Image (tube, coloured by chain):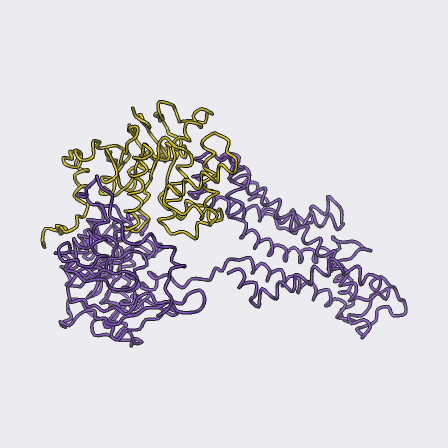
Chain colours: A purple, B yellow
Amino acid sequence: MRTSKLTSPVGITAIAGIIVLAFLAIAGPLIWSTSADATAVAERLSGPSLAHPFGTDELGRDILSRVLVGARLSLVLTFGATAISVGGGVLLGLIPAISPRPIRRLITGFIDLLLAFPWLLLALFFSAIWGASAIGAMLAVGLAGAPSFARLSYTLASSVMGRDYVRAARIVGVGPFGILAKHVLPNTFAPLLVNAAVQASTTLLSFAALSFLGLGVQSPEYDWGRLLQEGIARIYVNPLAAIGPGIAIVLTGMILSLASELFTDTARTRPVSLPLRVAKRVLENVAPRVRGEKAASTAAVVEASDLRVAFPDQKGGMVERVHGIAFTIQPGEIVGIVGESGSGKSVTSMAIAGLIEHPGQVTAARLNFDEIDMSAPLSRADSDRLGVEMAMIFQDPLTSLNPALTIGRQLTEVTEEHLNLGRAESTRRAVTALESVGITDAARRLTQYPHQFSGGMRQRAMIGMGLMGNPRLLIADEPTTALDMTVQRQVVRVLHDAQELTGAAILFISHDIALVSGICDRVVVMKDGLIVEVVDARNLIRDAKHPYTRALIACVPDMLTDRTRPLPVIGQREAEPAATTEKSAV
Amino acid sequence: MSALEFRNLTVRYGTGRKAQVAVNDVSLSVPAGQTLGLVGESGSGKSSVAAAAVGLVKPASGSITVNGQNIVGSSAAARAARRKVQLVFQDPFSALDPRMPIGTSIAEATLATGRRWTSEQKAERVRELLGLVDLDPDRAKQLPGQFSGGQRQRITIARALAAEPTVLIADEITSALDVSVQGAILNLLRELQSELQLSVLFISHNLAVVRYVSHSISVMRNGVVVESGETEALLAAPTDPYTVELVQAVPILGERVEFGSRS
């Protein structure tokens, strides 16, 4: 990852830029100082020419040479000040992370206080103390940048301090400084480095500004800011006298920004989360279809054959995660998909729901939901039907419910916006929906927000939301995994009741084969993107033939497992992490 | 003789009117060389018991002792005795420093033994422990990212063992793992327990798993222990209504979940 980043256009540009800057800082004054300091009164204040591309100043010195020589002082000051900001900030930020509470409060309060001051004001303040000199300006800009670094490193350190590995280190008796050195610093280093590079480019500008204001470098020394100040007076006569140093500042700033890009871990913005996409689709596409008008069709609710799903891998190829599977779901049937992580069970359910978006690819000989061809682009009418006829319930309802809206608003939105029902009618229907999922005092509960619901209640509300339309299929993806055992039982019951109430089919995805076999009609066992076996749930133990299914049954302890013997372990050793075992595209 | 004993332990979070009692007057004892299963649902206080034992939270009242030695408080003696209790965490992904080679993580825990280790001794010990948890000792220099969830959990167990604990606390150590991996980790824990004669406090919400590894079981709810007893006896005839509900809630393979209206 790192090496490919270094050879990317951005990487090459940044590295080339850094080399040029380093060269200028080291060799610039050695090569050009004679021409930069050579006064030639005859040629004073001349405009751009071949001999003096940026013109000359009032003593006839070549401005281009002065820009090249000035690089050293500009860069030294910039890096000096950045080092002060980062060093001081990290120190100030890390101390509270390991301090007892009262000291922590005191220091973070102090940091907040410093943050409230504009940096320029601080810089002026420091200049007043140390006088207007290059060193004074460096201290001023450096210290002025420290509070924001302190805040950043405190935040980063706090999040690392909350990790289990830090707890583990504390338990074995590693002291606070050991934890800082061994765990906190290495894990905050990358983001700090990125911000240091960003900070360096702002610092450069700060210096230019300070020198321009006459508070920074004093004559006869000069940096880019100073040259800019000298040039600006003549900008109408010789624009390049000001633009020349300006170009140097801008280019250096860009190089520093590009360099910071190099340090960032490849954090791409992730696409909209899946639950949100579902919610959006439901809200956008619900058709004016009245409940009770039950679909009369007796054909299968879901028909899939040769279903394949592929996702791009890191190298730009496609990795197939589901390898051509086929199955059907009959109306009112409860089908369970069982498998371990990486088996493709969730991906399969998402493909059925039409939720695999670019760059993921779904291909199938046949993929129908309720006579809608899901493998082709959907027509408006079809996606409307989908919105009311299919509901999806996820493992974590907190991410699929909007935290800023009341439960009632989220339920009635569907019917109000798209079924054109009045508020009263919608609310009445929402009350019925909540009651049918076993939420008592439904009218009051509707006015509450998701965070006021417990995990089990939120899951019930999600099922209730599915009942607001005219469901033909409920897809429940690990709906009880995050819940307690006793609550799991209640939620499973609610799902079962919803099935009886609406006659909808249910696709129940879980890793728990005992649970699935206890509530489903048929069990589909998946492994590595393939269907291993489809078994009648009622006779699972008798009918399961495939060794993997049998192993899955045997490896989970239940209340009857023989405690004197080791648990049977599934064939091969634990797999390596996904990245190294993913099979390449077929 | 009990290896780890909690007497009238109370743990509170927050102060004043907002204070929440997580553990309320709980007494538990982990017998030497045996496994005590602590089962309960979220909010039952079972993890707070573990956190109090290793010093991550300070008990409001009550005592915790290891082999009769007090381990509460910040005195040097209590701190030293406390290191005899080691914790294996639930999430193997956040329990290992992503930037630290696993061998270094394991070696770090030798600090808890209170002895001085040369770097050769540490390296030797790391190899030995990796072998003990069925991992390739030559992989000590690799980072956690190169291991699967189950392998990482083996590493965290090795790290806990590096501290040479009297008592091992396993807090939901299989709930983040796949079922097939869960079986292997449970087997490993049982083997280690009987081979090393460890005393284990095994905490889980999964009654079937607790039943499989524990000699005796305590059931917690809302910060209180509602029932305790020898595993088979307790599960055969639970008396507390909550324990009864918990036992019934465990899905049994090959048995339909009863809903009343439809079989």
Question: In front: B138, or B37?
Answer: B138
Query: Outermost residue, right direction?
Result: A42
Left or right of A504 on screen, residue A318? right
Is residue A143 visible in the rendered structure shown here?
yes
**Is B13 displayed left or right of B116 in the figure?**
left
- The quarter of the image holding the C terminus of chain A is bottom left
Q: Would you identify the image quadrant in which residue A252 lies?
A: bottom right
Q: Is residue B75 above or below residue A248?
A: above
- Above or below, A322 against B52 in this view is below
Q: Position of residue B225 (x, y in %)?
A: 25, 32
Q: Pinpoint residue B238: horizontal percent, then vertical percent.
A: 16, 35
- Number of disc labels: 0
What is the quadrant of residue A33 in the picture? Answer: bottom right
In the depicted structure, whether residue B224 falls above or below residue A368: above
Q: Is residue A425 visible?
A: no
Residue sitting farthest toward the top: B68
Closer to the camera in the image, B120 or A230? B120
Q: Position of residue A2 (x, y in %)?
A: 53, 60
Q: Position of residue B37 (x, y in %)?
A: 26, 36
- Residue in front for this viewpoint, B259 or A560: A560
Left or right: where does residue A41 sit relative to residue A311?
Answer: right
